[in-house]
Amino acid sequence: MKQVISDIDDVIKMLMEHKVEVPAIVWTSVVPTMRKKDVATRSVENPFSVVRKICKRAVTLNPVYVKAVNEQRKQEGNTDEFVGSKHRWATTVCNTFKVKGDQLYLSMIINKELLGPFYFGISAPNNNAFMLDNALVEQFIPKNDTAHYQGLETAVKYTSMILDNVVFIETDFFIYEKDGFDKSLFPI
């Protein structure tokens, strides 16, 4: 039976106790990095002031990044070993967490996008959010070429999210839901 928890400190404790990779479903709500002008032509002004990106993903927590990249390289027929570089921006704790100053980040490998992304705009504090067209928003979000850096055709999508931006986690042994998160509000 899965333990239902509502305290993020319990999530931290449970993931640190599990020293192996943990498959999970994770919902995140983040403010995406956006440019002032569109990425392609740099001629269109970004009209958005406050945007949140909501995603539901199948992920691996406690990931061993270098191992995942090397496994993907083998699948693609590349036998050269990948040697990752140390994260300069944060300290890694138990493969799952990164610490930078007083911020804690949850590291994961994204296996599959299950739902979203959905972009929401907020016109003023305490107003309801409204859904935005993905194409309109994504033209201001920079893309990265991780596959090239990893020496792969299909990138291993490794990311670290500020723990406060993780609103729901379901693993084989626990479910965490952040206070106030209601997944029924999203178009499923």
Image: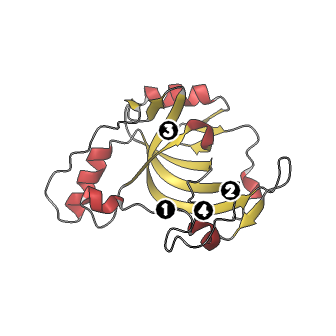
Q: Quick one: SS at disc 1?
A: loop
Q: Residue at x 59, y 55 (%)?
A: 56
Which amino acid is tagged 1? Pro
Considering only order in the chain, which callout, 2 or 4, is on the residue closer to the N terminus? 2
Q: Earlier in the sequence, mark 3 or mark 4?
A: 3
Which amino acid type is marked by label 2?
Val
To which residue does mark 3 refer?
106
Q: Secondary structure at mark 2?
A: strand
Q: Position of residue 168 (x, y in %)?
A: 63, 44
- Vertical relation: 88 (above or below) 109: above
Q: Residues within 10 Å of mark 3 (few under 14, many from 20)?
A: many
Calculate the distance from the C-alpha at mark 4 to the C-alpha at mark 2.
18 Å
Q: Residue furthest right?
A: 127
- Of mark 1 and mark 2, the one earlier in the sequence is 2
Image depth: mark 3 or mark 4 in front: 3
Q: Earlier in the sequence, mark 3 or mark 1?
A: 3
Quadrant where the image shows the C terminus: bottom right
**Quarter that holds the N terminus:** top right
Q: Quadrant of residue 34?
A: bottom right
Q: Residue furthest left?
A: 79
Q: CA distance from mark 3 to mark 2?
A: 21 Å
Give the image quarter of residue 185: bottom right
CA separation in Å, label 3 and label 4: 19 Å
| Marks 3 and 2, the one that precedes in the sequence | 2
User: From the viewer's perspective, is 14 left or right of 156?
Assistant: right
Q: Are marks 1 and 4 in contact (CB under 8 Å)?
A: no
The residue that mark 1 highlights is: 142
**Which residue corresponds to mark 4?**
115
Local packing at callout 2 (Cα closer than 10 Å; few below 14, some 14-19, many 20+) is many
Q: Position of residue 121 (x, y in %)?
A: 73, 59
Task: Tell me where residue 172 appears, x and y as whole percent.
Answer: 52, 42
Q: Residues within 10 Å of mark 1 (few under 14, many from 20)?
A: few
